[in-house]
Amino acid sequence: MSQNTQLPASQPQYPLLSVLNPASATPLPTTAQTAAATTTTTTTPTSPSAPNTPPVPSVLGLDALFNNPVFAGGIGLAGLGAAAAFGRRALISGAALLRRQLLVNIEISKRDPSYNWVLAWLAQPRDNSGFLAQRLTRLRNLSVTTSTRSLSPRGVPDESGGGGGGGGKIHADFRVQPGFGRHIVRHAPGVYIAVNREKAGTATTATGEPHETLTLTLLWRHRHVLADVFTQAHALAQSFQQGKTVVYTARKMEWAVLGKPRLKRPLGSVILDEGVKERLVDDVKEFLGAQQWGYLLYGPPGTGKTSFIQALAGELDYSVAMINLSEIGMTDDLLAQLLTQLPEKSILVLEDVDAAMVNRRQRDPDGYSGRTVTASGLLNALDGLAAGEDRIAFLTTNHIDRLDPALIRPGRVDVMVRIGEATRYQAAQMWDRYYGDIDKDHSGRERFLKRLDELGLFGGDSQNPDVPKRHTSTAAIQGLFQFNKGDMEGAINMAEGLIPRTFEPDHSASEGSIKAPA
């Protein structure tokens, strides 16, 4: 077939489409067109094709990891978490910065005296009128402190200063205060104080109790209120102690208030021998404000040594700080530390100083051995006691013969006073105190004193050798009077019970037998 031979132009490329839709059918190229295209393709110079280079793999294989949808999703979540953590930290830092700029905090340790003052101040009733104040200042977590005291039916305080005798009623005082946690207190209109009372999870080595802190928070522009808070708290504490004596006791390595402040004991309630009390009080007042002054009261137990010190503290408006040197666990170092932290305007009372004169080891039944205060430790502690106008030292002992002469030299002990057994003068004064309202003519008192003379309880009668030489204590006489309240005949008839008794072991008695003393 020649090149000019052409196929019929009416022959379609897709017969089926032409049949279905002749208008849209595309004609097939002719032979000449095909040849021309072939010739053109053949004559056109072709460029060399690029080699098929495979992709370079990543050194760490990260491409495959990032192409993994699970890994890519994890990376996205991690990024969101990091952004959230960063945002949270930024928010906390911003809030802390805002608090520092707008708020002021003050932390009070339990070791500070103002801790109990502020707690008592927070427990006082307040005017919380108003919708906001009523809902913000509701205290839902409270704590209570209970204290008890005896009330004598006749109102006569006992020799120990407790204020009550046998058979008296027990009076209880309950003090409610904010418990541990967060509270809000309304101090004044528009002024609120956030209170946070916290307790440590572990006990301190000093007291064996968990340490406590009290934090007060308020707006910076209300910071002047803090001065008012502490002023009012201190004034409230002073009002609680008005007419009372605060007694401190050594608790491990610090001083602690022993119970509630006690009513001041009047000097008239302590009966010493004639003139002794007056001379002591005058001497203390004379040297008050000078250097530290030391007194030694010695004599048998139950003669009123400690009672006189408490009454003297009430007369001078001082507190009492008591240390028992015979207490197990009291050492030289602990004693020295306590004396350097002595409360201001207080009378220091060192009881049983003779216990420190024997350098020995005490062993408990369970095998524990602990050293008491030594003589040298006591002397060094007294020498290191800061001299000041608000401190008076009283030492007491039942055995003066056991004391080291170095202890009672001037500078450590300036005045020594013997508080001995009950005398006729003391017995008469105590009788008038208990039965003066019913023994108008003093006839009962004379009979009582005569009976004590017959029993030889005033040291015997030098002119009658048949009367034994005996002694009794004021504590024993007081116990007799309290047992026979309002019954002076009963007190006279039971005077024989004032005779001191010595108890010898009865080996013939069976285990658990009960018998009256002979």
Image (cartoon, rainbow, N blue to C red):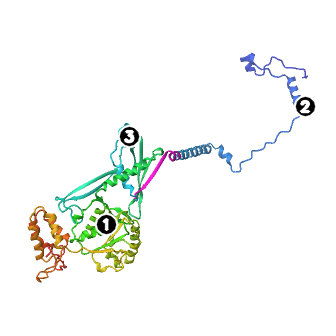
- Cα gap from disc 3 to disc 1, whole angstroms: 52 Å
Q: Quadrant of the N terminus?
A: top right
Q: Looking at the rendered structure, which numbered label has been put on residue 285?
A: 1
What amino acid type should be assigned to the residue bearing mark 1? Lys
Mark 2 vs mark 1: give the one in front.
1
- Cα gap from disc 2 to disc 1, whole angstroms: 138 Å
Q: Nearer the viewer, residue 167 or 36?
A: 167
Could you tell me residue 328's position as x and y percent? 34, 72
- Residue 296, quarter of picture: bottom left
Q: Nearer the viewer, residue 218 or 206?
A: 218
Mark 3 vs mark 1: give the one in front.
1
Mark 2 vs mark 3: give the one in front.
3
Q: Which is more N-terminal, label 3 or label 2? A: 2
Name the residue: 38% across, 40% down: 133
Residues at circles 3 and 1 in contact by the CB criterion of under 8 Å: no
Mark 1 lies on a secondary structure that is: helix
Judge the density around disc 2: few (<14), some (14-19), many (≥20) Cα neighbours within 10 Å.
few
Q: Is residue 108 magenta?
A: yes
Point out the stretch of residues depicted in magenta.
97-110
Q: Is residue 277 left or right of residue 427?
A: right
Residue 466 in sight:
yes
Q: Is residue 353 magenta?
A: no
Find disc 3 in the rendering and name its residue: 133
- Cα gap from disc 2 to disc 3, whole angstroms: 101 Å
Could you tell me residue 203's position as x and y percent? 40, 61
What amino acid type should be assigned to the residue bearing mark 3? Ala
Find disc 2 in the rendering and name its residue: 43
